[in-house]
Image (cartoon, helix red, strand yellow):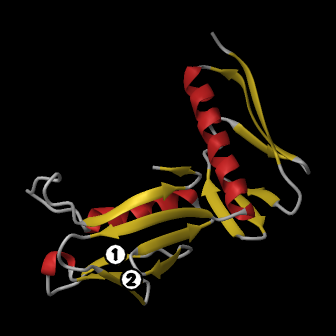
Amino acid sequence: MKKEIIKEIEIPEGVEVKFEEDELIVKGPEGENRRKFEKRIFEIEVKPDKVVLYHKKATKKEKKMINTSAAHIKNMIAGVQKKFEYRLKACFSHFPITIEIKEGKALIKNFLGEKIPREVEIPQGVEVKVNGQNISIYSCNKELAGQTAADFEKATKVPRRDRRVFQDGIFITHKAGREI
């Protein structure tokens, strides 16, 4: 059954939203987010105080796309107001792990006694702070912050070992907005 679907997202004060061609640009006090949306699936209209997503004859597929895009836009607006934060902790039982940030890369040294450090690429727009064994990742783009945190976890994954026995590694302890 096809019906008209309209989704409205409020724009708070201090946040500027523009839609140019197929790219939505959100600017705020913490930074800027950009994302491309396909115009042929649904329409996006930016008004002074809200963003409107709509489709005149939407099926289930268009409804899913509108709701997903609305969630992305809400995350973009929230990110330019206050940066998303992910916290990680380096855990070890014998060999102390040290993390060092150099030139857009994080070097994980002495993991399981390895002589060659493991590297994690830090994307542009992501800020990483290391305080002893605690790592904090900040970004106004939620997807970049989450992917960087996942890259840290993946870099210290121990292959072909029982996770219950070999518990060394870097693990996410706090995602954007909730404890784990």
Which circle marks residue 61 in the picture?
Answer: none
Residue placed furthest toward the top? 1
Q: Which residue is mark 2?
A: 105
- Secondary structure state at the residue bearing disc 1: strand
Looking at the image, which residue is at 34% across and 75% down? Answer: 120
Question: CB atoms at circles 1 and 2 under 8 Å apart?
Answer: yes
Marks 1 and 2, how far apart at CA: 6 Å
Looking at the image, which residue is at 59% across and 52% down? Answer: 177
Q: Nearer the viewer, residue 140 or 117?
A: 117
Left or right: 67 as drawn, with respect to 89: right
Pointer 1 or 2: first along the chain: 2
Residue 43, visible in the rendered structure: yes
Q: Residues within 10 Å of mark 2 (few under 14, many from 20)?
A: some
Q: Which residue is mark 1?
A: 120
Quadrant in the picture for the N terminus: top right
Residue type, label 1: Val
Q: Nearer the viewer, residue 140 or 101?
A: 101
Residue 148, visible in the rendered structure: no
